[in-house]
Amino acid sequence: LAILSVSAALGFLPVQADIFGNWKAPSATDVRSPCPMLNALANYGILPRDGKNITEEDTIEALGTALNFDIELSRTLYGFAISTNPTPNATIYSLDNLGRHNIVEHDASLSRSDAYFSDPSVFNQTIFDETKSYWTLPIVDLRQAAMSRLARVRTSQRDDPNFVLNEKFGLTEVALFLSIIGDYTTATAMRSNLEYFFENDRLPIEFGWNRPLTVFTSADLDAMVQRVAQATEEVSGEDSRLRRGCRKTAKQPG
Ligand code: HEM
Ligand code: MG
């Protein structure tokens, strides 16, 4: 009781403070994925640190405890995860399974190379620098988030002869980082927090990030995906108008 009163006076519960208290970089034998969030959860030990043999229960528990994910949404995501295990009818997955190309992992990622060029699981600073170049303000909004993904798609379309578009997952990942690293209602995120998250596989706790206060459901995710899709349509229209303008200018003599 005394401990709880002290904790309450300090404004936190020991249990909550604790789950993010032990971040460690992966060891040489630990496996990781193309997903910065699952990697981060493994680095905290909220998922198994070795990244191996993860169960449905582990997934539900980790996403619920760390991110306030609804059980049904966690089940759906777990379903995608086990679909990447090469063993038929598997009920567990390892984080390195997730890097198998064109199952869930796809081209035009925000922070990873296309599989055609190099391992799509590992963070790639050059790729992420391209993404970040569209985040020109300290607060990244829906428009800049959508623009950065669209730019990555266009670059891959141009450069990767094996390019395959996976719009659904691409939009979902933008929806996830805005909702979970940023703020669901405003669909914005602090640029510095996004950079910290992607570049370190770590949650920006030290910079004021907190576990979302309300439960995050499939319906919430779907609604955010719609907002990102809408924003993508808007910036894509804007961009083609701009390009038409450029061509017209270029044709003018002198
Ligand atoms: C990317 C799986 C949960 C955020 C990915 C990728 C996979 C994946 C396979 C690689 C896609 C690609 O870029 O080629 C999963 C699974 C999850 C899960 C199986 C749950 C069991 C989450 C959560 C978040 C998240 C909760 C919340 C922020 C992201 C982001 C990317 C991503 C932002 C894009 C990375 C990039 O484009 O470089 N995820 N993920 N994921 N995931 Fe997850
Ligand atoms: Mg990828």
Image: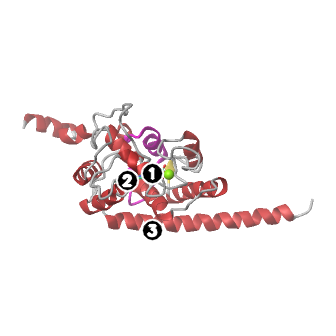
- Say what secondary structure mark 2 lies in: loop
Task: Tell me which label, 2 or 1, sits earlier in the chain.
Answer: 2
Task: Tell me which label, 3 or 1, sits earlier in the chain.
Answer: 1
* Dot label at residue 112: none
Disc 3 designates what residue?
226
Mark 3 CB near ligand 1 (8 Å cut): no
Residue 143: name its quadrant.
Answer: bottom right
| Separation (CA) of disc 2 from disc 3 | 32 Å
Q: For this rendering, which residue is in front, 20 or 92? A: 92
Is 176 rendered above or below residue 46?
below
Is 233 rendered above or below residue 200?
below
The quadrant of the rendering that contains the C terminus is bottom right
* Dot label at residue 86: 2
Q: Do tag 2 and tag 1 residues touch (Cβ < 8 Å)?
A: yes
Residue type beneath disc 2: Pro
Mark 2 residue crowding within 10 angstroms, few (<14) / some (14–19) / many (20+): few
| Separation (CA) of disc 3 from disc 1 | 27 Å
